[in-house]
Image (cartoon, rainbow, N blue to C red):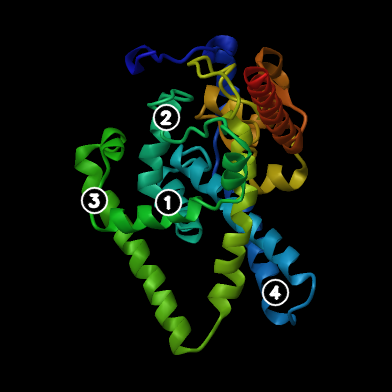
Amino acid sequence: MDRSEWLPVGTDVVSRKELKEYMVRNNHTGLIHFAVHIGAIVAVGTFLWLTPFAWWTIPVMFVQGAMIAFLYACMHECIHSSAFKTRRLNTIIGRIGAMIIMRPFLYSKYRHMAHHTFTQHPEGDPDQVAFPRNFREYFLHVSSYNIWHRMLGNLYFLSLGRFSEEEREFIPDNELRNVANEARLMVATYIVIAILSVWFQSWLAVYVWVLPRILGEPALRAVRMIEHTGMAESPNMLENTRTTHTNWFVRFFYWNMPYHAEHHLYPSVPFHALPRLHEEKVKEHLAEVAPGILYVHYKVLKRLLTAKNAAASNGSEARS
């Protein structure tokens, strides 16, 4: 289907009048949530720094890294200006989260708007996580093997003011310089941190931020994969996006984004209202509400195994 025909379907399941009560925003809910999120990162980081390396250090680093990586959801909410009532606060907090996770805020904003406009469009959705063609692709994605090359390369080229054709499609021409300048500021900040670390001969930033950030990225990949992978390549948002029930840790630190179908249907609804919107208005209309993250990945792996067995069987028949 051509992009011009990719018009959203499904938003009429909740009337505008009913939706108003879910769209009420405030500053204090988001500030408290952000303070607890950052506080947990600081607390675990302090614990890591003050305790000697032991067998449990790596698992604790993973938890620390997952909390850091999940700041993506905080930045994401601020991109939509739904985390806080005031636009200025959304921008400030969003940029703080972006700096920590090493993803440019302004660039992510325009990229993400394209994702919402063309959700699951094979060519128009820059954030589509296509269904893996084989087990190798699946594990490369979940392990984040290719993600860091893309993220760091992205920062590098943006800071040079070099944009791909795809990026020029979703970034307005008058914002290209601002996007490049933001990337330059981020790169400069990281260089300053590196210089200070060397100057003071300190491994603090590496030990409590960089290493956990790397270890925690697969947690983010695993969660982001459940949002659309395997869903319909269709503009119908009741079918192209999946809501997944998760544990309290993921719900809190991922800012309720597992209620992803609700978010795509009504992106202006703040994160704290999504569970109520799901229960009261949306859940019976959705094509899929998954019982858990592992369940979705089990379905993906089972589908890959079925395809592999079918290919092997067809190959055997062809040779016989």
312 or 274: nearer the viewer:
312
Secondary element type, mark 4: helix
Mark 1 and mark 2: Cα distance apart in space: 17 Å
The quarter in which the N terminus is drawn is top left
Q: Residue at x 30, y 36 (%)?
A: 166
| Disc on res. 48 | 4
Specify which label sits upstream in the sequence, 1 or 3.
1
Check the image and name the residue furthest to the right.
55
Residue at mark 3 to residue at mark 4: CA–CA distance: 39 Å
Whether the residues at callouts 4 and 1 have beta carbons within 8 Å, the answer is: no
Query: Looking at the figure, which quarter contains the C terminus?
Result: top right
Tell me the quarter of the picture where residue 293 sits: top right
Q: Which mark is residue 150?
A: 1
Q: Does residue 244 appear anywhere in the picture? A: no
Indicate which disc, 4 or 1, sits on the residue closer to the N terminus: 4
**Are circles 4 and 2 on residues that touch, CB within 8 Å?**
no
Residue that protrudes farthest toward the bottom in the picture: 200
The three-letter code of the residue at mark 3 reads: Arg
Q: Which residue type does callout 1 highlight? A: Arg
At label 4, the amino acid type is: Leu
Residue placed farthest to the front in the image? 320
Tag 3 residue: 162
Which residue is identified by label 2?
125
